[in-house]
Image: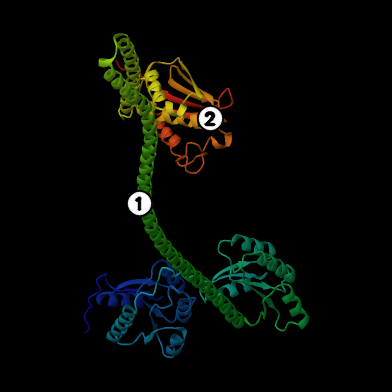
Amino acid sequence: MIGPETGPPEGPARILLVEDSETQALEFRLLLETHGFSVERCATAETALDHLNRQQPDLVVADYHLPGMNGDELIRQMRLSLRTRALPVLMLTGGNGGERQGLESGADAYLPKSADRDLLILRIRALLRERRAAGDSEGPGAAAFRRGRILVIDGSATYRTFLAGLMGQDGHHVASANGPDAALAALDAAEGEPFDCVTVDLLGHAYDGLALCRAISQRRAGRAAGAGFHLVGIAGSDPAKDFLVEAFAAGADDVIAKTDAEVLALRVRGFVRRRLLEEDDRRIAGQFGERERAVERARAEAEASEARARLADALERANRDLATANRQLTDAQAKLVQAAKMASLGELVAGIAHEINNPLAFILAHQGTVERLLGELPEAAPESAGRLIEKAHQRVGSMRMGLTRIQDLVLNLRKFSRLDEGERALVNVPEAIETVLALIQHKLGDRIVIERTFRGRAEIQCTPALLNQVVMNILGNAADAMPESGTIWIDTLSTPEFDEIRISDTGPGIPESLREKIFEPFFTTKPVGAGTGLGLAIAYSVVQAHSGSLTVETAPGGGACFVIGIPRQAACA
């Protein structure tokens, strides 16, 4: 006696028993459950197919002789579906001679019902071992099993019943109609689950069979690709050639004699089987196509991810290079600005040296004269001594004037050095402007007239560089713009929001097209070597640091007018 087999970790093997006999079904159930199997039982092949749609067992044990659809046709239907194609089947029969039919239909093993029960259990376990070794064949794309759907149209109720029973033996769902109205209504009602095959009695007395065939063919032509059905015309025992031509012209796919019922059943079985296989082919092709598209999408996403990674690396390198270049450019710009300041300072120092040199030369010359007069004084006559002393006094007075001029220049230079401080302070605007004018007097000379109108606040809160660098650069450019002669107006005024310094000249002015560029670094209209192009750029940056504005307009006389606007702040005591 064979003992029960320990089931797999997921539970006992599930067996679907298809047996119409209640007594034998109970006997087999008890036998199988005793040996550790889980058993579900169906009495007909049709109910077994419905069960396979809901739940797939590990093995099917089916009787050959069943009511309606036989066991061999059940196995054929199972082998048509991807879902049940690889499911092992053991066929049982009550007599001899069924083994060949069972195996030809697709069964994996055959046993007579009278066989030894231990042999039955051994055969079942062998089939289960083979299935587990091969793995579960039901994949995510396996479709539910579908039974064929057939519409029988015939005016005779007797023949409709006979034909429906004949088709039902193959497991098909069969609907029937007694005329055109019922047939067309059945076709319309089956839009969600269309028929696979439609049979039409072409010789019906209650309706025109050929006309109905044409109407059904037109309905079929309006369906989507793959949703059509096979249209079979049923004629007399020996239809004439002309009638066959008319039937095929009306849309029939086949014409079968009414007396050949078995031939009709075989042909319908072939039509339905081919249609089910075509559906599986389309489904498999669609699944493979979807998988190929998924692979392509995954490959494209991987390539895009790699491209994004490469782009991120390139962007990071570009950002590093840009940061390095920006740092180098900033350093270079700082050096250029410092060079421009030094150039401006050099020009200023050269002018001051010239201004100091003139009175100094005058003093040295007079000093020699005074020494000579003092040397002649002891030997001079009394009347000449008074004249020599008077002349010496005049020369000393002239020397005092020269020394005073040098003293003023040094004082202005000291004021200018304080104006170069970077901290905000309370600055006297008129005094600061006069200091700048005194330092660039060598550049202005007698050819340029300075007109001053100080209407604004005398003191404003700002960095001294605002009145040092900015005003001096603008005044220097104005003097360069008037090589012969001209006038510069310096006007200050105050509003509730701003303190303004307006510097106008009578030079040629600045064209409208250049006004957007004059504040850019290195832009200059002077000849090569005559300017760095940084003076107004530095002035603009100083004004921007005060959150102010530096603009250029057309002066009333046609020259340029630079407007320095500084947001007003409360004066500090």
Give the residue at mark 2: 482
Q: What is the quadrant of the N terminus in the image?
A: bottom left
Mark 2 Cα shell of 10 Å, populated few (<14), some (14-19), many (≥20):
some
* Mark 2 vs mark 1: in front: 2
Position of 134 with respect to 153 (left or right) is left
Residue 556 vs residue 278, the one in the foreground: 556
Q: Amino acid at mark 2?
A: Met
Mark 1 Cα shell of 10 Å, populated few (<14), some (14-19), many (≥20):
few
Q: Is residue 76 visible?
A: yes
Residue at mark 2 to residue at mark 1: CA–CA distance: 43 Å
**x, y (%) of residue 413?**
33, 26
**x, y (%) of residue 84?**
42, 75
**x, y (%) of residue 541?**
41, 34
Q: Amino acid at mark 1?
A: Thr
Task: Please identify the residue farthest to the right as the structure is shown.
Answer: 242
Residue under the image location 35 percent in, 53 percent down? 320
Color scheme of the displayed model = rainbow
Give the residue at mark 1: 324
**x, y (%) of residue 467?**
39, 26
Relative to 76, residue 40 above or below: above
Relative to 288, residue 572 above or below: above
